[in-house]
Image (spheres, rainbow, N blue to C red):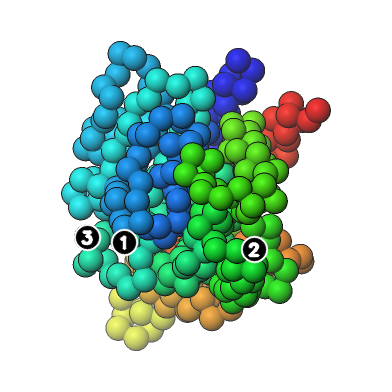
Amino acid sequence: MLETKIQTELQNKVNKKIAPLFSKYEMDFSSLESSMKWKPIVLIIGNYSSGKSTLINEIIGTDIQRTGQAPTDDAFTVITSEGSDRPKEVPGSTLINDDHLPFVKFRKYGEKLTSHLCLKNVNSPIFTNMAIIDSPGMLDATTEKDRGYDYMEVLGEFAKMADLIVLMFDPHKAGTIKETYSAIRNTLPEKSGEDRIIFVMSRIDECDSISDLVRSYGTLCWNMSQMTGRKDIPHIYLTYSAEVANFREVADLWPQERTELMAKINAAPDLRLNHILEDIDRQVNELQIVCEAVTEFSQRGRQLFMKIGKITAGLGVGLFCFGDVLTNSLISLPRQTLVSSLRGEGFSFSNLILPLIFLLSAMAVGGIVFTNFSFKRLVQKTLADSSNLVSLENEYRRNLWHKMVGKINALLKKSKAQDIWQGHAGNLAKIHRFLEGDLKKYYEKLRP
């Protein structure tokens, strides 16, 4: 399959050319690595009664997830087809230790998450090239202690991996859940693109009348505007379960919504390569601006070093030539200066000892001044306004800077004087060649 071949090529090229630079600049490569692995992913999220499990069962065509009005599942469940030779259910402890799967990075969240993570292997052609991740229902008042892990942070990691995120609501809790607010307001915009998120109000068959449905829909739109901070509301799909719908009046008014929703979910695999390229493009550009800043800082450090070096060299040459003349006039040592010996008064290599000591001492003092004073002052001055390290000529660059300035400042704070001689300019050239050469070629391959 062409898409699989391109995905493998991309993974190999990124691992070879770019991965070492992520490590070099202490940037997280795991999310990019995860996005290139495995198969397309659809992430289903929503509050505990929003119809997530019912939708998943309908997609699969069998009741694999428990359904109900109350919370029925508190785990992140990966549903896919791994082949008939694989177990029907794989525990989280196995998933996070399988390097062929994209879940290794979840080790850091500990046993509490691991025990609430599993994979269900279903015999369905739909899932040969797709996985659906069902998530624990969002709640109104929880803390990390309540779940044992940071739910929003974990949700953000899954959102990074997903090619499509389906955020579901029910008519009775139209966006008022606290965790839903946090997800829409903060987590999803930071971790995923808006084009990857679709909003669904399910269970519309439970509304008593059309006016009741319109009221619930209006409430959800209002809450969405508050959560997103935007006046333009994204499209909200209205749907229901065909198997449990108990009156046809509402269902018949929006049959195309269900069809469109299912079509979007089934089309998620077609978006995979584009999303991988987008993720690579975004994260390598983040790497590039970090490298640009460090390269510019190193250049300034070398300029400062050369400035101090010139002063030190001048002082050292002066002391080399006339330092022993000064000590001779003060303490009558040495008996014969280097200058007098060169005038024909019997040159000896012993005449070089004191001048060389003066020269080396001047160089040592210059090094100490640069390392302990001038370089540290340069770091402090740069941190006071680090934005002038790079060009911020457009909104895209400014957004990149805003996102990466914390990482850049952290690297500057821990930098040492000898770091200015590292090959940052060469690294920057490698990144530029990858973005302008390799990555563009792959974009061209996907053009119709």
Residue 373 coordinates in the image, percent (x, y) = 42, 78
Q: Crowdedness of circle 2 by 10 Å Cα count: few (<14), some, many (20+)?
A: some
Rendered location of residue 267, percent (x, y): 63, 33
The amino acid marked with disc number 3 is Gly
Assign the N terminus to one quadrant of the image: top right
Q: Earlier in the sequence, mark 1 or mark 2?
A: 1
- Element at badge 1? loop
Q: Residue at x 43, y 36 (%)?
A: 57
Is 308 rendered above or below residue 86?
Answer: below
Separation (CA) of disc 1 from disc 2:
39 Å
Which quarter of the picture shows residue 145?
bottom left
Residue shown at 59% from the left, 68% from the top: 212
* Left-right relation of 350 to 112: right
Residue bearing the label numbered 1: 150
Which mark lies nearer to you, 3 or 2?
A: 2
Q: Residue at x 51, y 68 (%)?
A: 175
Q: Nearer the viewer, residue 116 or 174?
A: 174
User: In the image, residue 245 lies at what x, y percent?
Assistant: 52, 47
Tell me residue 418's x, y (percent).
Answer: 43, 58
**Is disc 3 surrounded by few (<14), some (14 to 19) or many (20+) residues within 10 Å?**
few
Tell which residue pokes out farthest to the right in this image: 448
Name the residue that disc number 2 marks. 210
Q: Secondary structure at mark 3?
A: loop
Front-lying residue, 43 or 29? 43
Of the two numbered discs 1 and 2 in the rendering, the one whose residue sits closer to the viewer: 2
Amino acid type, mark 1: Asp
Q: Is residue 72 visible?
A: yes
- Asked whether residue 341 is in view, the answer is no
Q: Which mark is residue 148?
A: 3
Give whichever of 110, 389 is nearer the camera.
Answer: 110
Residue 34, numbered circle: none
